[in-house]
Amino acid sequence: MSDIVAKTLGALPVFLLQESQPGASRPSGASRLGTLIRSITALRSKQEEEKLIQQELANLKATVSSPSTTLRQMKGCMVRLIYCEMLGYEASFGYIHAIKLAQQGNLLEKRVGYLAVSLFLHENHELLLLLVNTVLKDLQSTNLVEVCMALTVVCQIFPREMIPAALPLVEDKLQHSKEIIRAKAVLALYKFYLIAPNQVQHIHDRFRKALCDRDVGVMAASLHIYLQLVKDNPSTYKDLTGSFVMILKQVVGGKLPVEFNYHSVPAPWLQIQLLRILRFLGKDDPRTSELIYDVLDESLRRAELNHNITYAILFECVQTIYTIYPKSDLFEKAAKCIGKFVLSPKINLKYLGLKALTYVIQQDPSLALQHQMTIIECLDHPDLIIKRETLELLYRITNGQNVTAIVKKMLDYLRESKEEYTIINLTGKIAELAEKYSPSNEWFIQTMNVIFSVGGDTMHPDIPNNFLRLLAEGFDDENEAQQLRLFAVQSYLTLLEKDAPYPQRFLQVISWVLGEYSYLKTDVHPESIMAKLSTFLELNSVTSETKTWLLVAVTKLAALTPSTDLIDKLTEEFSSSLDTCLRQCAFELQILHKNLEVMKLLLPVNASCEDLVVDASLSFLDGFVAEALDCGAAPYKPHHQRQEEKLSQEKALSFEPYGPSFSSSLPSSVVTGRQSPSGLSLGSEFSVNSTEPGLKEANLLKIEGVQKVWGKEGYLLKKESKIGNVSQATVPMGDATESAMPPANESKDAISEEEKEKQHLASTLFIGLGSSSAISLMGKSEHSTQKFKKSPKSHKMKNDKASLVQNLASSSFRPVLDAGHSNSEQRSHSIELPMLRKSSLHSPECLESKVPLERSKSLNEVGLSAKLSSLFSSNNLNIFHPLQMEESKNHCRPSLPLDLAEEPHSDIQELAENDALSVYSCKVWKEDSLSLLLFIVNKSSSALNTVSLMFTDSDTFKVSESFVCHFPVITAQSMESCLGWVEMENPCTQGMLSGHVCYHLEADVPMQLKFSVTLVLSDFIRPLRITTEDFGKLWLSFSNDVKQTIKLPNTQESLTVVLNTVQQKLRLHVVEIIGEEGIVACQLLPSLPALLHSRLHKGTLALWFRSPCSALPDCLLYHWQREMEGC
């Protein structure tokens, strides 16, 4: 490796400079760099290196600052500055000179300047704005080298605010005659999509043209952006499945140029990209998966085990097979491939096998049973990566029967691990398994105690916080919740008897539990508990924050006992503490303890989950404010209004080049901090870490101290990482005892002690993975019961979205926004009638027509069918045409009831079907809600029994609680329907709401049909009818904004025509239009507002969106652009 670095550094001067100065008295830049490198390599200590580099930097600073320095000399200085920065020494004085070199030099000097800028600066660097004009000028240059350099810089570093200025120029380069320019333009657009996806959504047709470009490099570059697009929204690109399949067939067939091969493998990275794209397209889609089966089979057959790159291709094939709609033949081939990997003596292959097993274990648990002995052996493997992946595999197969054995293995390894990442990862996984599969209350508390003791202050803070929340909220069974709390109290009292140091977070957990629930332990007097806690207050090793937790716990216990000398001692000691929070708690304890009745009223027993009504408007200060105003005091102005007025008096920098811009403002985002109980007054009945009252918590003081990650399915935050990247694997235990090898003369039939131990361990770890609990190939999963089920009272803790607007808007404006929320509450009582009607398929209401499929523009619409004949034309490739998706069969369709047919609604569309039934949907856009009507049609000639329709939990959407329909029987050739409302909790441009229909045939065979409904943001947008005055008040209070300038298709249209057109499509409210400026208001149901200020100037429309939600303006801008394209 050192030889390669030495050769690279030796060739760097020749590559960058390529010039010499013959006859010059001074040495050339190449020789100066070579001398510097040789001097550094000859040094023997870090101190000598630092001294030499500092001297070199001083010389370079004097050289670049001299006005007599030529551009040629500046180029040599930049090369040496790059080398110094590579060694880790700051050379910020040269950043501005690198920008100047990129602006003023010739081609070679400009290249060095661009290289230095891309290495020195980051995307948010303030000096990068000085380079924008140079990049835009080079993008319009006729010199190919300058265009390439500009596109390269755009791909690496480019400010997000300047994308609108460069986007049209980059789009034009997609039509360039040179292949390298087109490829770099595609990569630049990919970069734009990653940092600002809403600004490139309108050029998807250009991406489709790049996919069928005649040059293979351009086509390969387009796969990067298609992989991201398909990953974000696969349903929009289903029509491209045939194209991707045909490209993969030609790649696998070796019809690409030889220069794309790697170790005789045809374009392996292209194969991997295409397999990942097909994986997302075919997921839960039988029709699309049918198109992929053949090419997957061909890829498996051609990928021979002869090189590492083929292993990667096989791994991607296995992942794709287990992701798309299942097929038994491919499952068998993939299982054989995994078996070869797992049983291979090569570490790389064994790791791939374990990783593949970890990925597919949810679909086919029998594979783990087939290789259980190999997995047991991997627990003692000398390679740490193998151990980690093995433990991750065990974590994935955990169930209620083997949880104790697997958690024991994890805890053993946790005790030995010293790595911070491993501790954080393992503690999170163990906490999730303990909460989800706990066999008893005692085991759960003991396991959590080990996590707190071993994880210490290194573990994620959400683990103790959510443990306390679990205790506070309780479960469905209140008696069981009380028993869990009682055992926790007993456990912590026992721990306090031991004279042992505990981590700070563990002490905080102990103090909170004893302060809240020690009353359950009737045989222990509160004063004795206070005495035990007070001993920790005297320790210097306890931090001030933990002492605050302890003092708050003592305060809660003091409400249960009369006055004692201990309380007087503590108040006297901490009343003079230098820590503000400790001193405040001591004063509160001192004052409250003088009146025990008031103290009991403020600190009731078992009331940690009760909401406290807080006067967010501080009405008790109204008299003081009125008196101050009468005396001539200036009225209060919000922070944003003060900032607007300040900037309006100055010349602010406009971030919108070459177009109309608004008065620049720099809105500060609202930061909601996290504070410990030390920052809370004792009036709060909940002492765990809580969030400061922010915009969304203006009316009520909530107890939500952390993100809600404990749900019906367990530890939700860690569950996401569990589904996602399997590389975040936990580290297995390392204390397993080494067993001696069995004697060579022992007979084969005799089982050694080592084998007996392994078999016993396997029977413990892999229990519960038999046929009764296995997940079938058709995607039916076991229904595991969770040990701890949350109490319904936890629903009271959800934030009221209307309070967000009430906190930001003036008091006179509140009724306007409260209406939406009140309507939402009324809706929850009026709409939740799941079963509407039942009709026969032979009734005249059924219409016979084809089911329309929602798709984006097909390939034929953009001329792809004709252009694909030129794809790889120079390489004798087969010409292919996009495969047409199979049309849905004609059959009778349901219709809307009369009361809903009068409302605006979508067409009735088929979501899923099989031989027995079909599922249809229809959106009804009511004024205050989005109603979703689902039809379950029995197409078979026999009845369907025990039919139930349920939705999958979604982070984006919320459905009404009664939107779960159960039908005892659906007779042959008949239909049932369900109605409910849907809300978008997290704004996005488009999302999928998934669900399934479970039913039984006459033979009592359980079946399942999965479906998904595509919902877009515009389905949830409604007009917000406000006045111009109210618009102005809200505008100043919102902090999240997005600006964009777009070109109108028809430059002669007036602003009124444009706004009225978009108003009808997006259901907006045009507040007022004055000349060439207009203001528009809307709201995301139920009551999340969004405002728009627009200005028309010479055929361009400048848009400025604002909202209290950071994601909503981007999403609205995307839909606005889409609607403008259709105008």
Image (cartoon, rainbow, N blue to C red):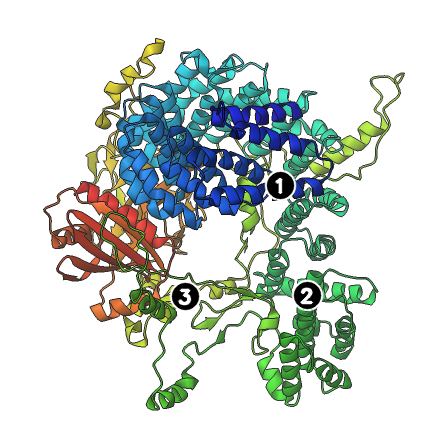
Q: Which residue is mark 3?
A: 800
- Label 2 SS: helix
How many numbered tags mark residues here? 3
Nearer the N terminus, badge 2 or badge 1?
Answer: 1
Q: Which residue is mark 1?
A: 53
Three-letter residue code for mark 3: Asp
Amino acid found under the numbered disc labelled 2: Gln
**Point 79% across, 62% down: residue:** 501
Of the pair 740 and 285, the residue shown nearer to us: 740
Residue 287 can be seen, yes or no: no
Q: Position of residue 375 (x, y in %)?
A: 70, 30
Q: Position of residue 992 (x, y in %)?
A: 38, 43
Quarter of the image for the N terminus: give it: top right
Residue 383: x, y in percent?
72, 31
Left or right: 559 as drawn, with respect to 663: right
Q: Residues within 10 Å of mark 1 (few under 14, many from 20)?
A: some
Earlier sequence position, callout 3 versus callout 1: 1
